[in-house]
Image (spheres, rainbow, N blue to C red):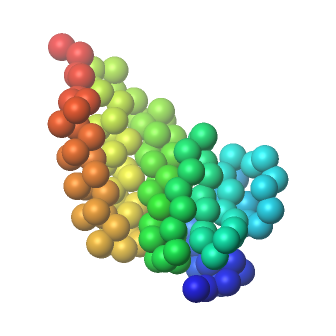
Amino acid sequence: MKTLGEVKSQIEKLAGQAGIPSELIPSFGKLSGSNAEVFVEKDKYHFIANGNEASTNDSDELIYIVFQEMTKQMGYIYEVEHRDSKSDSRRIAFRRQLELLENLNLDWKKRREKEIEELLKWYPYNDQE
């Protein structure tokens, strides 16, 4: 198991490569009440963001989860700046998120594509006519 410091360094390095603003990078260590947090407890990594929590023993899985969340936020920020009132906002947001993930790790992009496909089966796009 990587130390929290090692995980933090890896996340910060990749976030810099992706141009993710510092305010979207989670805090590390003890719970601080910030937007997103990563900490270790009982030999597991925990990630809390937007009221959701994920736990894993695998540092690579944790890093994917963190980047899935950060790039999702970046996708929606991009969508607001490039809004198309006739298109479901998720089209632009998801496209941007996948672009960011592709630049970081092609496997992450493929994994997220599958997750989006499953989501759209239950909640399809709702474009305006």
Tag count: 0
- At 66% from the left and 63% from the top, the residue drawn is 38
Name the image quarter holding the C terminus: top left
Q: Report whether residue 119 is seen.
A: yes
Q: Picture coordinates of residue 54 (x, y %)?
A: 53, 56
Q: Residue furthest front?
A: 42
- 80 on left or right of 84: right
**x 60%, y 71%: residue:** 44
In the image, residue 80 sits, relative to residue 115, either above or below, namely above
Instruction: Where is residue 2? Give x, y as percent.
Output: 61, 85
Residue 3 is situated, as x and y percent measured from the top left of the image, at: 67, 84
| Quarter of image, res 29 | bottom right
Please say if 83 is above or below 20. above
From what the image shows, is residue 113 above or below residue 9? above
Please report the residue visible at 61 percent of the width from the left and 62 percent of the height from the top.
46
Quadrant of the image containing the N terminus: bottom right
| Residue 45, x across and y down, in percent | 60, 69
Left or right of 94? Residue 114 is left
Q: Give the residue drawn at x 46%, y 40%.
A: 76
Q: In terms of depth relative to the viewer, which is nearer, 77 or 59? A: 59
Q: Residue furthest top?
A: 129
Residue 19 in sight in this render: no
Q: Nearer the viewer, residue 15 or 32?
A: 32
Q: Answer with left or right where residue 19 lies relative to residue 12.
A: left
